[in-house]
Image: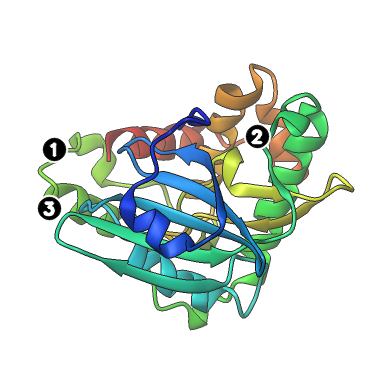
Amino acid sequence: MTIPAASEPVPLRVRELAGDAVLEPVWRNAIGGLTFRATGADGIRFVKYGPRNAETSMSAEAERLRWAGAFTPVPRVLEEGRDATHEWLVTAATPGLSAVDPRWIADPARAVRAVGRGLRALHDALPVAECPFSWTVPDRLANAAARGIRVPVERHQAPPIDRLVVCHGDACAPNTLVGDDGEWAGHVDFGALGVADRWADIAVATMSTEWNYGPGWEEPLLAAYGVAPDATRLAFYRALWNET
């Protein structure tokens, strides 16, 4: 994931969705999808636009955002749609900056603490019994198989469940929003949200600290979350993430 150049061409559909708003590219994901900040007379919106893919969809994300929004701070869905090749999602702005905004990259101790505390708060807030979505290992393996991905047999048997929670599904540091006070303020990017062992999220969140802040931040994140290291579960869920 990268920050696009200010000169990034604006797709026609994004311009139509944004109307007269001023557009600023803020994010590019691994499959070429783009997110734009649209600032207009009616406030700030975010427009996500990208190629359709089989792993998840913006329609699935919109459904999950609407559900999760009853329990925790997430972007409010304004519009979503798709055509034969692309899909889009428009959401209202949510207070806070991404935990990888330059402000927080320069203060990794506070950023990592916010990511860890925010992930724990998310897991504590979302009710497992009421969640209609799943992100369990069998479901992830089935999704990978449908996309033609062959996952090593070692990943077909997960460690015993530690604690079932509603996982974020992509708990990398950029998807936590941090407020001016240095505390977590919300979360974004919920295309894979679903019930799973909490270590499926924790493993990805800790792994992403090195990508975004450099080495040495895994244990501070675990401490902020409030859990001791679990080498077996960390290794399993990191490998599953990389292989699916």
Nearer-the-camera pick, 177 or 3: 3
**Residue neighbourhood size for the residue with mark 1, other residues' Cα within 10 Å, grouped as few (<14), some (14–19), many (≥20):** few
Indicate which disc residue 100 carries.
2
Q: Amino acid at mark 2?
A: Val
Per the image, the residue denoted by label 3 is: 146
Q: Which picture quadrant has residue 125? A: bottom right
Q: Give the residue drawn at x 76%, y 28%.
A: 108
Residue 226 can be seen in this image: no
Q: Position of residue 39 (x, y in %)?
A: 63, 56
Residue beneath the point at 54% across and 54% down = 198
Look at the picture and state if 14 lies above or below 101. Answer: below
Report the side of 116 relative to 58 (left or right). Answer: right
Q: Nearer the viewer, mark 3 or mark 1?
A: 3
Which tag, 3 or 2, sits closer to the chain's start? Answer: 2
Tag 1 residue:
150
Within 10 angstroms of label 2, few (less than 14), some, or many (20 or more) residues? many
- List the single residue furthest toward the top: 215
Residue at x 35% of width, y 35% of height: 30
191 displayed left or right of 56? right
Helix, strand or loop at mark 2: loop
Q: Tell me the CA gap for discs 3 and 2.
A: 33 Å
- Where residue 227 appears, as percent x and y from the top left, is 70, 45
